[in-house]
Each structure stands twice: as C-alpha cells, then as structure tokens.
Amino acid sequence: MQTGFRLNLTPVKEPLGFVKVVEWITAVLAFATCGGYTGRNVLSIICDGSANETLSVTFTYPFRLSRERLLESNATLCNRTVAETHLVGDSSSSVEFFVAVAVLAFLYSMVALLVYLGYMHVYRDSDFGAMFDFVLTAAFAFLWLVCSSAWARGLQTVKDATGTAGLESTLALCRDGGVKCEVTEYASMRSLNISVVFGYLNLLLWVANAWFVYKETRWHSQKVSAQQAAGRGPAPAHI
C-alpha cells in the first residue's frame, strides 16, 4: 500500500469532508466571539439630598469578576465613605474550557482535512484511521455539549453579576435608605450570546459528522454485510 501524499478534492465534495470544513469555520467563530471580550456597564446612583453619582463597571474575558474592581478604596459617594468593592463571581473556568475545546476542535479539523485531501487512500485502506477518527469525533461531540452548557451557565452568571440586581447586592451603599442604584447603560453581549449559539451548532455538526465517519469504519461495513447476509437467507438445499 502506497502511503505518499495524493491531493484529492473529492472528499470535500462529500458529506465526510464538507462537514469537517464547516466544523473548522464554526470552531473559529466559537472562540473568536468570546475571547478578548471587554464590556462596560454604567451604574447610576441616585442620592437623597446630594448630587447623583455614576460608576463604570468594566468586565473582560475570562470573566474573573471577583478581580474586577467596582470601587476604589474609601471612595466618597452620596456623602458616605464606601470601602473598596469588587464584582462577585467567576466564570473563567467555563469560558476557558469552552475556548480550549473550540481551539482543539479547530486544530483537529485541520489535521483531519489534511488526511482527507492527501491521504484518503491510506485512511480507507486502514481500519485504524476511520476508527480513530470516529472515536475522536464522538469525543468532541460530547465535549461540545459539556462546554457549551457550562459556558451558557457562566454567561448567565456574568449577566446577573453586572445587572442592576447583582450590583445592588454587591455595593453596600445601594442598600442604604434614600439611595437607589440602577444600571442605565448596558454593554452589548451579542457576541457572547452568539458564541453559545456556535457552541451548540458545533455540537450538532460533530454529532452529524460522527455518523458519516462511522460509515467509513469496519464496524459499519460488518453490520451492513451481516444484514445483507440475513436478508438473503439460507442457501436452498440441493435435491
């Protein structure tokens, strides 16, 4: 069996290769829409008997909110001295897991496409290639389910912590009588919402791809052969 590189674009025109191209693109979009994000909300503080105040609430990827400072030490607001305050929450583990899966999926898709386009003759002549591809594809489908669900929950944590209710519970001043706090300007989280959508889209793509890869394996060919043999039934007895 020859193992040299042979460029063949036919697999890309088939579901096996075409879905891998789509997976490669959606993996890039998944981590690009959440990595490097920076958002800023504006908290308006309405003081009773003094000038109103505003605070800028900044939060960035990977959303270690407990490290984001909401207020400097011993600041004066509404004629009151307020201690240093940080945001509450930490979504770094979920978003970093999501990005890691997306990057690994991107890299694996590239490697798989290289094999499909240049070494498909080896891939189909060897039992190991398709079986290894199927196991990894199924594993990535599972990882997309887990990381997308985790990041969806982590994103909700970010929204809750930076919204009016979350900041009111974080900043002690907002709980004082005669003081009202409200977020009046919200950062756009559209790209973060889109990243979650791309996560679940990748899940669907990798599940579909697992079926097409499975059809290349020995397990599928043996099943088909067994079904065909059963359909033909026993050979007629000679008289």
Image (cartoon, rainbow, N blue to C red):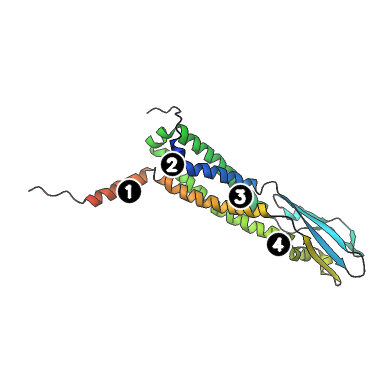
Image label count? 4
* Residue shown at 62% from the left, 46% from the top: 31
Q: Which residue is mark 4?
A: 160
State which tag comes first along the sequence, 1 or 4: 4
Tell me the CA gap for discs 4 and 2.
44 Å
Residue drawn 54% across the image and 50% down it: 202
Q: Is residue 70 visible?
A: yes
Callout 2: SS: loop
Q: Residues within 10 Å of mark 4 (few under 14, many from 20)?
A: some
Q: Position of residue 113 (x, y in %)?
A: 50, 37
**Residue kind at label 2, given as amino acid type:** Glu
Task: Tell me the amino acid under the disc marked 1.
Answer: Lys
Name the residue at 74% across, 64% down. Answer: 166
Q: Which tag is nearer the camera, tag 2 or tag 3?
A: 2
First in sequence: mark 3 vs mark 1: 3
| Label drawn at residue 98 | 3
Q: CA distance from mark 2 to mark 3?
A: 29 Å
Element assignment for label 4? helix
Q: What residue type is disc 3 on?
A: Phe
Residue at the image position 92 percent from the left and 67 percent from the top = 50
Three-letter residue code for mark 4: Asp
* Residue receiving disc 2: 14
Give x and y (percent) for residue 1. 37, 28
Q: CA distance from mark 3 to mark 4?
A: 20 Å
Residue contact at pointers 3 and 1, CB within 8 angstroms? no
